Every structure is written in structure tokens, then in C-alpha cells.
Image (cartoon, rainbow, N blue to C red):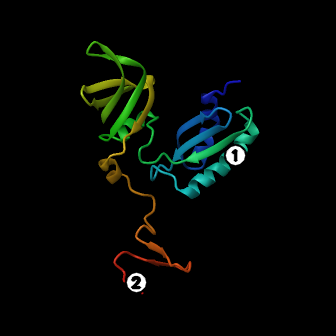
Amino acid sequence: MAVDRADLRHLIEPVVEAAGFALVRVQLSGGRDLTLQVMAEDPATGQLDLDQCAALSRALSPVLEAADPIPGPYRLEVSSPGIDRPLTRLADFDRFVPHQARIELAHGIAIGGAIRKRFQGALAGVAGEDILLDAEGVGRVRLPFADIRTAKLLLTDALIAATAPLDMRGADVVVEEAPDGRRSTRTPGQVRQ
């Protein structure tokens, strides 16, 4: 029996939203060892921290248990989209202008007498139901959102600079372990005692 991804999304999305998050992607993968990946974000940060992932997992588990949408055993994985995140919603393509993205279409479009399915370049926004992309070697193209098979941001220095970490506490602390197993902490530049 095939699992309908739309049914999974309709089951999962209200739970994600009730927890105060936005659903990014629902993906079922694997052969015998199935994994149901629920990718979500906190609208305030665009990410989820470990505690938020755990809380969302606890909220989803009883709903999935009761509905039993996937025949047989599977593993539930709740995750944050990360910096080089997938672009799954039309609004994502506006939100991440002018960052670099890689987009693959299901059917492709005609460019210069050839059908092309894969594009990479700077996001330039949305026009109706089309994605605007300043594609490398091609220039500005309009890609139909409905035909996108996969799309994701590319990890660049500009994207890293624009993406604030969730929490910087402890980022400037060095933990050192002595040969006898004792640990000490210090900040860079602090003299060891």
C-alpha cells in the first residue's frame, strides 16, 4: 500500500502549526527501514533548536500513532531545515532573494533550442506562480513552481553571513581536558591558570 504524501502533510501540518512552527517539508524515505522526516522552522528564527525538535516530536508521536498512516514500522525524524535548506514553498523563493539556489524541474523548459531541467543561480523573486532565477550561463529565467522537483539554497559565504545562529551562548568558550580527566573552561585570550 502506497503512502499518500498529501495525506501525511494534512495530518502533520496542523500539529506543527499548533506548536507554533511552520512546516517546511514532509518526506518519507528508505526501503525496509522507513524514515518519516518532518522538517519545520520557528517563524521567528527560520530554524529549530534541539529542544524545539524534541517538543515537536513529542507532539507528533501520539497523532501519528492514532492515525497510523504508514503501514509497518518507521522512524520519525524531526529536524530544522539548516542553512542550505530546501525551498519548498512559493514564499521561500522571495524570502531568500538574492541567495544562490540549485533548482531541478520535473519536465524542463526550452532554452536555446534545448530542454533544460537543472538550473543554478541567484534567486530573483516570484512572478505569479513562477520562480525568477538569474541562472548561470543563461540569464533571467522563469521556472514554473508547479514543475519544481527539488530546490535548495547553496551554502555560500553570503548565506552564512545572513543566517544568524539561534544561540551564541558558549560559542566563545574553550573546554579543555587535562590528562587526568579534569575539565576547565576559558574564553579565547583568557590566560590559563
The label number, if any, that marks residue 89 in the structure image: none
* Identity of the residue furthest to the front in this view: 179
Q: Nearer the viewer, residue 141 or 181?
A: 181
Determine whether 121 is above or below 191 in the image: above
Q: Position of residue 113 (x, y in %)?
A: 28, 12
In this figure, which residue is indicated by the disc labeled 1? 61
Q: Quadrant of residue 100?
A: top left
Q: Position of residue 142 (x, y in %)?
A: 32, 24
Quadrant housing the C terminus: bottom left
Q: Quadrant of residue 70?
A: top right
Determine whether 91 is above or below 18 in the image: above
Classed neighbour count for the residue bearing mark 1: other residues with Cα under 10 Å, few (<14), some (14–19), many (≥20): few
* Dot 1 amino acid type: Ser
* Identity of the residue furthest to the top in this view: 113
Q: Quadrant of residue 37?
A: top right
**Residue at horizontal 50%, vertical 79%?**
178
* Dot 2 amino acid type: Arg
Q: Nearer the viewer, residue 42 or 72?
A: 72
Of labels 1 and 2, earlier in sequence is 1
In this figure, which residue is indicated by the disc labeled 2? 192
Q: Position of residue 154 (x, y in %)?
A: 36, 41
**Under tag 1, what secondary structure?**
helix
